[in-house]
Image (spheres, grey):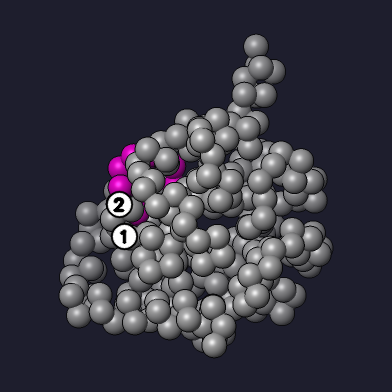
């Protein structure tokens, strides 16, 4: 069994346990208390390359990253640094996250937030909506065609945007079959954990015009961002480089070019 299969199995077990503690009917009853709408896709299509700044304490590939990090302080720094949106890991066993992190991020920043987890059950969509997410990650590699379509349609019915993640041409074709509007190209091979940013450049020509494209993994510097912008990528999702930075706000400004924009304005 590969790491991705272990993660998926773990996600299913976690969902089953949470369903016993909090039935989906109770989650549905809480939907009416959702806060204001923060359109996720819209934030990624503003002029220039948008940054989705990610909060995570650890990962299967990197191990411990920032085990004691405070989600509120980090996302506030990301917002001050010019990020367009936030990504919050909610998987506990492998990423050290929680739904409470999602709730805390919602209260600490005004940016739209994507719940990043291994979404395998509609129950998780209701959790995402109730705890403050504006979007969810759907990983094509982790889902059958039937599951992908059902989750995508249910998410949209709950007014959640979907970042549909692919790694190769076959997965891209499957994402387009459900008419995914936001395509995430993950440069990381989830089975072997190898990262190659060329994955994005190779898949970009196959993405139809009008789709919003997000490049994920292996991105840490302005030169890479400029190249991705040049080929038509709309946004990048960056976590590791921000979480290991001594000053997350300063690193965010470096990646977004916020200080450069200010200098040109004056």
Read off the magenta span: 102-112
Q: Is 169 covered by the magenta stretch? A: no
Camera-side residue of 133 and 152:
133
Please report the residue visible at 68 percent of the width from the left and 68 percent of the height from the top.
194
- Give the vertical position of 113 relative to 192 (above or below): above
Q: Label 1: state its secondary structure.
A: helix
| CA distance separating discs 2 and 1 | 6 Å
Residue plotted at (61% across, 73% down):
190
Pick the quarter of the image with the N terminus: bottom right
> The residue tagged with tag 2: helix, strand or loop?
helix
Give residue 81's position: percent from left, percent from top.
Answer: 52, 32
Give above or below for 250 relative to 42.
above
- The quarter holding residue 181 reads bottom right
Residue 62 pos. (x, y %): 55, 60
Q: Residues within 10 Å of mark 2 (few under 14, many from 20)?
A: some
Q: Which part of the image, by quadrant, shows the C terminus? A: top right
**Badges 2 and 1: C-beta atoms under 8 Å apart?**
yes
Residue identified by numbered label 1: 99
Q: Residue at x 56, y 51 (%)?
A: 240
Q: Does 117 appear above or below 55?
A: below
Residue 264 in sight here? yes
Q: Which mark is residue 103?
A: 2
Give how far across and how far down residue 229 sits, in percent. 74, 45
Residue occupying the far top of the picture: 266
The residue sitting at the front extreme is 64
In the figure, is residue 78 to the left or right of 222?
left
In the image: residue 63, left or right of residue 168: left
Say whether residue 81 is left or right of residue 214.
Answer: left
Residue count near mark 1 (Cα–Cα under 10 Å), binned few <14, some 14–19, many ≥20: many
Asked whether residue 110 is drawn in magenta, I would say yes
Res. 229 visible in picture = no
């Amino acid at each position: 069994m590969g790491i991705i299969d272990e993660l998926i199995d773990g996600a299913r077990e976690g969902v089953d346990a949470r369903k016993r503690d909090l039935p989906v009917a109770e989650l549905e009853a809480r939907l009416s208390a959702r806060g204001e709408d923060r359109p996720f896709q819209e934030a990624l299509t503003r002029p220039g390359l948008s940054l989705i700044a990610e909060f995570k304490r650890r990962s299967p590939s990197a191990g411990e990253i920032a085990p004691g990090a405070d989600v509120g302080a980090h996302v506030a720094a990301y917002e001050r640094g010019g990020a367009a949106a936030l990504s919050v890991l909610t998987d506990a066993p492998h990423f050290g996250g929680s739904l409470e992190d999602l709730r805390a991020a919602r209260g600490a920043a005004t940016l739209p937030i994507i719940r990043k987890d291994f979404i395998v059950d509609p129950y998780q969509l209701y959790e995402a909506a109730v705890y403050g997410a504006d979007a969810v990650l759907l990983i094509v590699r982790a889902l059958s065609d039937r599951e992908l379509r059902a989750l995508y349609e249910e998410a949209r019915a709950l007014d959640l945007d979907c970042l549909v993640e692919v790694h190769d041409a076959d997965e891209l074709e499957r994402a387009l079959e459900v008419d995914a509007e936001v395509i995430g190209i993950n440069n990381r091979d989830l089975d072997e954990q190898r990262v190659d940013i060329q994955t994005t450049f190779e898949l970009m020509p196959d993405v139809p015009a009008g789709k919003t494209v997000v490049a994920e993994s292996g991105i840490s510097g302005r030169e890479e961002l400029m190249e991705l912008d040049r080929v038509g990528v709309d946004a990048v999702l960056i976590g590791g480089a921000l979480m290991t930075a001594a000053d997350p706000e300063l690193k965010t400004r470096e990646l977004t070019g916020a200080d450069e924009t200010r200098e040109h304005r004056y």
